[in-house]
């Protein structure tokens, strides 16, 4: 069975993870440059200094995308490559790189989906308080203005932020990601509020420049999967997805309710109102710049049943349940139920902006890269996304993470998520078996996927 007509098949990557050229042609440093150069911060002492050298090899990489048959490519921009100090003078060489990349994609019939911010915050602005500084939303709006003026004539599809819960939770509260801070809850929710203001202001900038722009955010968070088809278990899984009752930045709707509905989740705000920035309510009209589609990054979900008095109860996975090389659980049904619950709540077409797995891939003696687990994983997850469509959810696109193996943040080069294998010593690219499989999926609009 095919996917809906006009469905967009793509793949994704992020600037710091693939570009390299960390000090090339006037680029300023980001918090990830600082963090990756901190002894012991990254597995094996790896960094994104070179990564996949996409900065110099982008034409080769676009040809690989064309071979796979991608309709679209989700890329992010390095803020400090364009504005070395985060604000102020433009680095024309950096801006021209993205100008050429966009042209190269379009020349190969690949639609760019541009993410403005995928975690590489300019280091100079971090020294001025970073996301803790209320001015950060204005800095971000200035950056957005520069980008949309340069690229907005050719880019219609935008994402303001990638996974704000992660760069807040792991970067500023947990100290695991850049900038490596271990702040308290008041600072975490201040950051979250400023990030949401930045989304609102950037969205206004983009729409002022291009009235037909399609804007979203690549959201992620806790998603429930009912353990049975009973109404009680389905409702418990829905509650698990949206029960924003604890002072945590990991709930999806903490980030999406203010954008879509103009209010923070009622129970959530009760839990944290005392530590929110003074006068935060006055900023809600700025934040309330609704999406045009719902971008969702999803890798796994939690199995949930109705417990006492119908309250959601998470069910641990049985011993020996499948996991990826990252030790993330394999839960394909999340692509059926997560989109369903989100579509019911927000009434927007769902675009999966990231989905994939880390796998133990290497070049075999025959010169090929055989990754049957990735093919199976993709088949199961996409099959469940198709089930979401069959249940009435409007689905609009799927972006595999990732187009190529790359720098996996604090894990360095240890994990391989790509459809394309990268030898980091020689920079040789090799299409994996999964890339050819995905090529056939795209060509058939999903009809080649197994039914189950």
Image: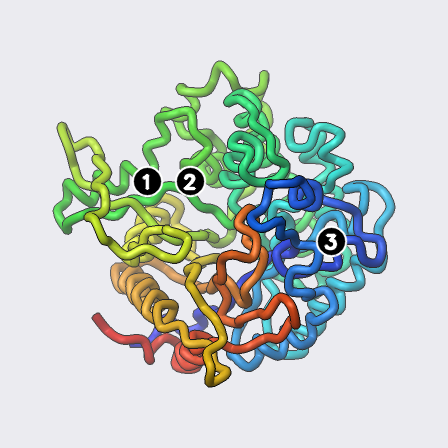
Q: Secondary structure at mark 2?
A: helix
The answer to whether marks 1 and 2 mark residues whose Cβ atoms lie closer than 8 Å is: yes
Question: Residue 217: image x %, image y %?
Answer: 53, 48
Separation (CA) of disc 1 from disc 3: 34 Å
Residue lying farthest to the top in this orientation: 274
- Residue at position x 51%, y 17% in the image: 275
Separation (CA) of disc 1 from disc 2: 7 Å
Location of the C terminus by quadrant is bottom left
Labelled disc at residue 147? 3
Question: Residue 205: image x %, image y %?
Answer: 69, 46
Q: Secondary structure at mark 1?
A: helix
The residue at which mark 2 appears reads as 252
Location of the N terminus by quadrant is bottom left
Labelled disc at residue 447? none
The first of marks 1 and 3 along the sequence is 3
Q: Is residue 37 above or below residue 438?
A: above
Q: Nearer the viewer, residue 143 or 14?
A: 14
- Residue at position x 46%, y 32% in the image: 249
Say left or right for 273 vs 104: left
Badge 2 density bin: few <14, some 14–19, many ≥20, Cα 10 Å: many
Labelled disc at residue 241? 1
Residue lying farthest to the bottom in this orientation: 366
């Amino acid at each position: 069975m095919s996917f809906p007509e006009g469905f967009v098949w793509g793949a994704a990557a992020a600037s710091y993870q693939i570009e390299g050229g960390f000090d090339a042609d006037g680029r300023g440093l980001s918090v990830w440059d600082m963090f990756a150069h901190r002894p012991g911060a990254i597995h094996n002492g790896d960094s994104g200094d070179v990564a996949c050298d996409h900065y110099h090899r982008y034409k080769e990489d676009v040809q690989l995308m064309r071979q796979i048959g991608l309709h679209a490519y989700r890329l992010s921009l390095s803020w400090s490559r364009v504005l070395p100090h985060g604000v102020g003078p433009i680095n024309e060489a950096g801006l021209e790189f993205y100008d050429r990349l966009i042209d190269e994609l379009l020349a190969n019939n690949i639609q760019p989906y541009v993410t403005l911010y995928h975690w590489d915050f300019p280091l100079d602005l971090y020294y001025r308080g970073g996301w803790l500084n209320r001015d950060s939303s204005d800095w971000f709006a200035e950056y957005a203005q520069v980008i949309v003026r340069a690229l907005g004539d050719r880019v219609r599809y935008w994402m303001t932020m990638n996974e704000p819960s992660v760069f807040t939770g792991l970067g500023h509260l947990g100290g695991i990601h850049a900038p490596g801070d271990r702040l308290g809850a008041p600072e975490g929710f201040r950051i979250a509020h400023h990030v949401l203001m930045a989304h609102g202001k950037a969205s206004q900038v983009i729409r002022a420049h291009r009235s037909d722009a399609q804007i979203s955010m690549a959201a992620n968070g806790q998603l429930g999967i009912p353990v049975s088809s009973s109404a009680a278990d389905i409702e418990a899984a829905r509650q698990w997805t949206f029960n924003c009752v604890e002072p945590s930045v990991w709930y999806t709707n903490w980030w999406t309710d203010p954008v879509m509905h103009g209010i923070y989740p009622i129970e959530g705000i009760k839990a944290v109102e005392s530590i929110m920035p003074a006068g935060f309510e006055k900023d809600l009209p700025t934040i309330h710049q609704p999406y045009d589609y719902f971008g969702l990054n999803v890798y796994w979900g939690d199995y949930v049943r109705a417990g006492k008095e119908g309250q959601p109860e998470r069910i641990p996975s049985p011993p020996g349940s499948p996991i990826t090389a990252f030790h993330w659980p394999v839960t394909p049904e999340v692509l059926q139920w997560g989109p369903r619950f989100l579509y019911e709540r927000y009434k927007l077409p769902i675009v999966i902006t990231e989905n994939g797995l880390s796998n133990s891939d290497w070049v075999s003696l025959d010169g090929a890269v055989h990754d049957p687990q990735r093919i199976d994983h993709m088949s199961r997850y996409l099959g469940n996304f198709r089930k979401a469509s069959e249940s009435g959810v409007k689905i609009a696109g799927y972006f595999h993470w990732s187009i190529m193996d790359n720098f996996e943040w604090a894990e360095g080069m240890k994990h391989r998520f790509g459809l394309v294998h990268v030898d980091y010593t020689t920079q040789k690219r090799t299409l994996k078996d999964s890339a050819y499989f995905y090529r056939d999926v795209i060509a058939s609009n999903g009809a080649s996927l197994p039914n189950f």
